[in-house]
């Protein structure tokens, strides 16, 4: 029996190379060895106010990007979270099992709510309960995510354990799977901040659908420092981040990369990196164009994915309700 993988991305903002390296690219490479479920988490997206038309378009865009990156709908279940009502139902139940104190420790909420101040929704505070429901509904073993989501997966695990202790073995305890390299790509404009799709500064992130010219410009303008040698040095976060992107995309090791750029400056390295990024994204961008030419195709894939996910979700929720004494 293969282990079950579950992961998801919110259909908001512009999907960037951090999402690709920290999540999607890894999902693709793990696909053959696991039993996979990849979700477009639109219920998570509405924790922040969204324009309905934009949200609808972003759902199709993100689905297209999953497929264009190499997620195969015949090997993996690809579906939209709001198509399966069991996610919301289990999220409520999880709410009733997760102590407030656990939620209050989540660092992402502290960062995101600090930016939004008084408009911050209860859903944003509470979203790890929905994320726990996503993961636990499918008896997930492994959750491949970027570094920023580790704490949320651990909370899902603790919630599962607490439920099992009270009601008997029901949930599988999930493990986060974080890459050694590429799990935390930093912003090009500020390498001390995580690259994020809700950040709007023009030079912050490389979008997966950026044109070659835009990619070149963004990389050439990326913040570095006044030193010159191209080496992996954690005290120089700008060049370190660019080297990490290079390493993750080429699969070369650190020593070989440093040797290749010995005696060369930041400018030469940035030019080489831009070409690596452009060539790595080219096949994805071409497939994306073909796949999304007919939006009906994307909608059909989501419908068929939901039909495959639903029976699994229904089974777990029925078991949970029975354990609790509901319905
Ligand atoms: P937002 O800023 O809107 O929260 P985000 O860029 O953090 O968006 P998410 O939808 O939260 O994107 O994350 C999708 C996946 O990409 C998650 O697995 C997350 O851990 C991963 N991820 C996000 N940002 C990065 C990053 N900078 N480096 C590596 N992985 C990342
Ligand atoms: N919260 C995550 C997205 C997400 C997720 C999940 C990831 C929602 N449900 C389940 C893994 C498993 C985020 O914002 N990146």
Image: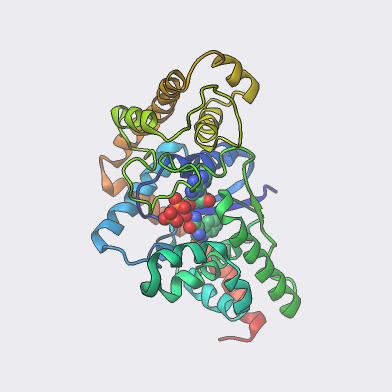
Residue 73 in the image, given as x and y percentages of width and height: 46, 44
Residue 72 in the image, given as x and y percentages of width and height: 47, 40
Give the farthest residue toward the front.
Answer: 226
Residue located at (44% from left, 39% from top): 17
Residue 107 in the image, given as x and y percentages of width and height: 56, 63
The answer to whether residue 110 is left or right of residue 117 is right
Quarter of the figure with the C terminus: bottom right
Q: Is residue 251 depicted above or below 205 in this figure?
A: above
Give the farthest residue toward the top.
Answer: 263
Residue 77 in the image, given as x and y percentages of width and height: 50, 51
Q: Nearer the viewer, residue 301 or 272?
A: 272
The answer to whether residue 186 is left or right of residue 206 is right
Residue located at (29% from left, 41% from top): 292
Q: Nearer the viewer, residue 210 or 261?
A: 261
**Quick check: can you spot residue 71?**
no
Q: How many marks?
A: 0
């Amino acid at each position: 029996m293969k282990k079950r993988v579950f992961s998801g991305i919110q259909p908001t903002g512009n999907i960037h190379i951090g999402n690709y390296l920290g999540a999607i690219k890894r999902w693709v490479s793990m696909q053959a060895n696991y039993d996979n479920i990849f979700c477009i988490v639109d219920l998570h997206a509405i924790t922040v106010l969204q324009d309905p038309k934009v949200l609808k378009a972003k759902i199709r865009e993100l689905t297209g990007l999953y497929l264009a990156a190499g997620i195969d709908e015949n090997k993996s279940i690809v579906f939209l979270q709001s198509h399966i009502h069991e996610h919301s139902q289990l999220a409520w139940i999880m709410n009733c099992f997760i102590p407030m104190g656990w939620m209050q420790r989540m660092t992402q909420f502290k960062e995101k709510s600090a930016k939004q101040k008084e408009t911050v929704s209860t859903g944003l505070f509470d979203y790890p309960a929905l994320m726990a429901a996503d993961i636990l509904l499918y008896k997930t073993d492994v959750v491949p995510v970027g570094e920023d989501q580790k704490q949320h997966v651990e909370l899902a695990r603790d919630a599962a354990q607490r439920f099992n202790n009270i009601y008997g073995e029901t949930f599988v305890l999930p493990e986060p799977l974080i890459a050694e390299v590429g799990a935390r790509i930093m912003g090009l404009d500020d390498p001390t901040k995580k690259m994020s799709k809700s950040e709007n500064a023009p030079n912050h992130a490389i979008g997966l659908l950026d044109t070659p010219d835009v990619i070149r410009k963004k990389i050439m303008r990326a913040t570095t420092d006044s030193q010159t040698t191209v080496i992996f040095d954690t005290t120089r976060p700008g060049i370190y981040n660019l080297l990490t992107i290079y390493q993750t995309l080429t699969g070369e090791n650190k020593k070989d990369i440093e040797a290749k750029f010995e005696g060369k400056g930041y400018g030469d390295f940035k030019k080489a990196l831009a070409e690596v990024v452009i060539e790595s994204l080219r096949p994805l961008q071409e497939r994306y164009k073909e796949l999304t030419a007919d939006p009906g195709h994307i909608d059909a894939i989501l419908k068929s994915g939901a039909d495959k996910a639903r029976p699994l979700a229904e089974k777990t929720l029925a078991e949970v309700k029975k354990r609790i004494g509901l319905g």
